Image (cartoon, grey):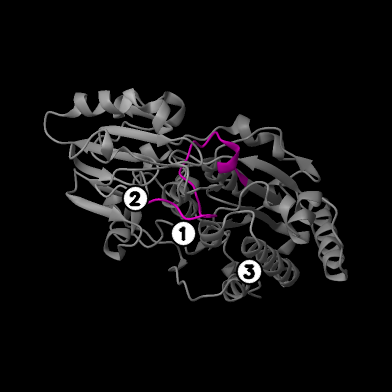
């Protein structure tokens, strides 16, 4: 894509080139002890090709770029906690943005503050606990799970999500920690999070003027951050990662199916998001499954019994948190179970995620630079974002949590 390189963009590119190049010359593998990872919610793998992002483009030129994929289901909470633990959602327990945990007799929901702070919902070990258990320090500036005392532990510093906090304000908080003149107080691991471009994409689609504005503002914030972080006394030792939890795809009012017509009043419980999950009324499991299976083609979905979800999705073994029927809509289709025929029909230009993680629209960007990473390298594998746990552990020289679902062969090519 041809872009007009402004003076500001050239300056960003120059600073990144000089900074990341000098890192490789000054540091050895044993000295690399700092990681800063930012998650940009729903930053699809091709957004930098669509819009003017000189900062991210520069990072790709002096570091690493990879197209990566989410875990199933490709939604925010399951994937952020997968990135933290190195586990698929079926193994770490946050099986979707909302679910009912029968073994606890409690519901988990992203909008329920009481549930979010309940450590009973979270399995596995998040990377901030892994880091601190092995003698290093973690600061986490909003991330799924950080509100709860998982394994009776919080990171040294953590910040709760605040919708009113601007990206620049958050960047300044992170910079305050990284640029601390007292080197011994600088965290080895820093994690932070932007809630965009997810929100704007949901409303306007990934290919809209509104999304362009937000993506380019994110890039401007990163330009500011990368310029100011050079003041850090450990700048030459920091490895920077900029990535995401899932992608996004456009919906349409015409791509809409209400499955209530085929299984009227047969669901005891249901979850009307991707994937659609259903617990049929007593004794109706086979009847509901057979009816839905018969309409797969016209319904633009695939349906399975929970225990028959294909192995490549790593889903269905957490029986107390996943309803017995799992229905995955075709990418770009909205499927609901509603007594009202038109309820849930998407608006024009609306978008969503939660679809097949193997579909390119669900894939995300991964940018990285620093002493651990190759320069000017485009990775040759699409890997699960849960490998972030392993990547961080390897850079910091610690052992990843066990068990985990990470695969070193999928990511090792990015490293020097």
For residue 377, side relative to residue 74 (left or right): right
The secondary element bearing badge 2 is classed as loop
Q: Which residue is mark 3?
A: 178
* 250 vs 330: above or below: below
Q: Give the x, y percent position of residue 41.
A: 54, 56
Q: Which residues are magenta?
A: 344-364
> Can you see residue 344?
yes
Seen in the picture, residue 343 relative to 162 is either above or below; the reply is above
Q: Which residue is mark 1?
A: 143
Foreground mark, 1 or 2? Answer: 2
Q: Which callout, 3 or 2, points at the residue further toward the start of the chain?
A: 3
**Which of these two is toward me, 334 or 348?**
348
Residue 324 located within the stretch drawn in magenta? no
Rendered image quadrant of residue 103: top left
Which residue was labeled with disc 2? 342
> At which x and y percent is residue 186?
59, 67
Whichever of labels 3 and 1 marks the residue nearer the N terminus, that label is: 1
* Residue mark closest to the camera, 3 vs 2: 2
Q: Is residue 70 left or right of residue 257?
A: right
Q: Nearer the viewer, residue 105 or 373?
A: 105
Residue 287 x/y as whole percent: 20, 25
Q: Is residue 318 left or right of residue 412?
A: left
Q: Secondary structure at mark 1?
A: loop
Residue 102, position in %: x, y? 19, 43
Instruction: Using the image as rendered, state which of residue 363 and residue 332 is in the foreground.
Output: 332
Quarter-wise, where is residue 293 in the image? Answer: top left
Q: Does residue 349 belong to the magenta stretch?
A: yes
- Asked if residue 399 shows in the view, the reply is no
How many C-alpha atoms fall within 10 Å of the one at disc 3: few (<14), some, or many (≥20)? Answer: many
Quadrant of the snapshot with the C terminus: top right
């Amino acid at each position: 894509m041809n872009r007009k390189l402004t003076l500001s963009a050239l300056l960003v590119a120059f600073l990144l080139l000089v900074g990341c190049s000098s890192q490789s010359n000054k540091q050895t593998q044993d000295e690399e002890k700092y990681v800063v990872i930012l998650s940009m919610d729903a930053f699809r793998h091709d957004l930098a090709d669509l819009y003017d992002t000189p900062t991210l483009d520069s990072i790709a030129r002096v570091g690493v770029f990879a197209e990566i994929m989410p875990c199933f289901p490709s939604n925010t909470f399951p994937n952020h906690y997968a990135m933290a633990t190195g586990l698929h959602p079926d193994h770490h327990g946050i099986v979707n943005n909302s679910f009912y945990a029968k073994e606890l007799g409690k519901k988990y929901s992203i909008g329920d503050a009481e549930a979010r702070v309940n450590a009973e919902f979270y399995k596995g070990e998040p990377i901030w606990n892994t880091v601190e258990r092995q003698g290093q320090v973690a600061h986490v500036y909003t991330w799924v799970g950080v509100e709860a005392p998982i394994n009776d532990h919080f990171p040294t510093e953590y910040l709760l999500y605040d919708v009113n906090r601007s990206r620049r304000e958050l960047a300044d908080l992170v910079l305050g920690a990284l640029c601390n003149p007292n080197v011994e107080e600088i965290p080895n691991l820093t994690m932070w999070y932007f809630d965009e471009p997810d929100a704007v994409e949901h409303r306007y689609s990934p290919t809209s003027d509104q999304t362009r504005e937000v993506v380019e503002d994110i890039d401007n914030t990163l330009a500011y951050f990368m310029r100011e972080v050079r003041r850090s006394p450990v700048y030459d030792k920091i490895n920077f990662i900029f990535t995401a939890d899932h992608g996004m795809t456009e919906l349409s009012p015409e791509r809409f199916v209400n499955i209530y017509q085929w299984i009227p009043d047969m669901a005891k419980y249901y979850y009307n998001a991707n994937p659609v999950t259903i617990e049929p009324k007593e004794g109706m499991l086979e009847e509901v499954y057979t009816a839905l299976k018969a309409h797969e083609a016209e319904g633009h979905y695939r349906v399975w019994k929970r225990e028959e979800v294909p192995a490549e999705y790593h889903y269905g073994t957490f029986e107390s948190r996943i309803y017995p029927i799992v229905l995955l809509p075709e990418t770009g289709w909205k499927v609901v179970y509603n007594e009202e025929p038109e309820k849930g029909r998407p608006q024009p230009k609306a978008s969503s995620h939660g679809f097949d993680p193997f579909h390119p629209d669900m894939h995300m960007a991964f940018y990285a630079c620093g002493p651990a990473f190759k320069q000017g390298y485009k990775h040759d594998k699409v890997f699960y974002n849960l490998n972030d746990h392993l990547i961080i552990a390897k850079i910091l020289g610690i052992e990843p949590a066990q068990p985990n679902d990470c695969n070193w062969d999928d990511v090792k090519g990015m490293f020097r």
